[in-house]
Image (cartoon, rainbow, N blue to C red):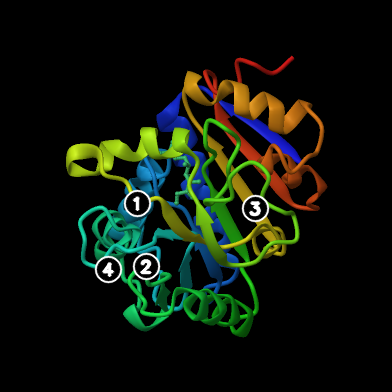
């Protein structure tokens, strides 16, 4: 597992965008498994710039969201589908037929999880998975305790996660459940890039990189992966020995 410490958030975002661009240059039809949240916003901005200025094309790539809130209609402003369209897909030449996101409003959520997992498998799994990390070490919405063998499923969000994500909801009413791609599905990605920025992530990053590999710190699983990298800014790396 590689650890790269970048000077600041801008440098981190550029380095992450370059890794995605490199994947696409070597494999234009790459399958990407992608996060939402505040951390990857700079990376998406840089990728949109690379598309505009340097002609980087996403037209043949396939995209999967890592997660989605349960019970939110896809056009809800706080849905992760809406986030991805707003911050990325609408700014590049992504093919709508190759954009996938769990449907948080599906009438049968269990069946939706199975459908989504099967779709990832049908596409051959992810060539590159980009992750953020929660303050409690979660990846996707795999909260502490998520089995390393888990697949796409419905999860209950940790109270601490709901408190942080209240920023995205009017009156702070964050759904209690979400659909997330599972730990095993993430782990099977050919390459994994975890991004962490800011002091609020320092403890989780140190636990993931230097603590035990344990289901109580989901991100620690990445240390068993043959091609995983942590991209950190100085603040997020501050807890490392
Ligand atoms: C979101 C996701 C989450 C976030 C994590 C960090 O799709 O999968 O694991 O990456 O909660 O969120 P930010 O970047 O907002 O600190």
Disc 1 crowd, CA 10 A, few/some/many (<14, 14-19, 20+): some
Which of label 4 and label 2 is nearer to you? 2
**N-term-proximal mark, 3 vs 1:** 1
| Camera sees residue 107 | yes
Which of label 3 and label 1 is nearer to you? 1
**Can you identify the residue that label 3 sits on?**
192
In this picture, residue 157 sits left or right of residue 187: left
Which of label 4 and label 1 is nearer to you? 1
User: Residue 207, image x and y in percent?
Assistant: 70, 27
**N-term-proximal mark, 3 vs 4:** 4
**N-term-proximal mark, 2 vs 1:** 2
Residue drawn at 36 percent across, 79 percent down = 107
**N-term-proximal mark, 3 vs 2:** 2
User: Residue 91, image x and y in percent?
Assistant: 26, 61
**Can you identify the residue that label 4 sits on?**
74
| Camera sees residue 24 | no
Mark 4 and mark 1: span between their CA atoms?
14 Å
**Can you identify the residue that label 2 sits on?**
104
**N-term-proximal mark, 4 vs 1:** 4
Residue drawn at 21 percent across, 61 percent down = 76
Mark 3 and mark 1: span between their CA atoms?
28 Å
Q: Quadrant of the C terminus?
A: top right
Mark 3 and mark 4: span between their CA atoms?
27 Å
């Amino acid at each position: 597992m590689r650890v790269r410490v970048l000077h600041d958030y801008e440098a981190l975002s550029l380095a992450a965008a370059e890794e995605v661009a490199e994947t696409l240059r070597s494999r234009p039809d790459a399958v990407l498994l992608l996060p939402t949240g505040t951390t990857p916003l700079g990376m998406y901005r840089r990728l949109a710039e690379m598309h505009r200025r340097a002609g980087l094309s996403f037209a043949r790539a396939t995209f999967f969201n890592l997660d989605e809130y349960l019970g939110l209609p896809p056009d809800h402003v706080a849905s992760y589908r809406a986030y991805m369209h707003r911050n990325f897909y609408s700014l590049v030449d992504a093919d709508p037929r190759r954009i996938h996101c769990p449907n948080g409003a599906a009438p049968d959520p269990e069946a939706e999880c199975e459908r989504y997992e099967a779709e990832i498998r049908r596409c051959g799994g992810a060539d590159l998975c980009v992750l953020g990390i929660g303050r409690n070490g979660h990846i996707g919405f795999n909260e502490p305790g998520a089995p390393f063998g888990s697949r796409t499923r419905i999860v209950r969000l940790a109270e601490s996660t709901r408190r942080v994500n209240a920023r995205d909801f009017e009156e702070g009413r964050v759904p209690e459940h979400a659909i997330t791609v599972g730990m095993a599905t993430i782990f099977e990605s050919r390459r994994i890039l975890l991004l962490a920025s800011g002091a609020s992530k320092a403890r989780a990053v140190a636990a993931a990189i230097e603590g035990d590999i344990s289901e109580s710190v989901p991100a620690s699983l990445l240390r068993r992966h043959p091609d995983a990298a942590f991209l950190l800014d100085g603040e997020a790396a501050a807890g490392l020995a």
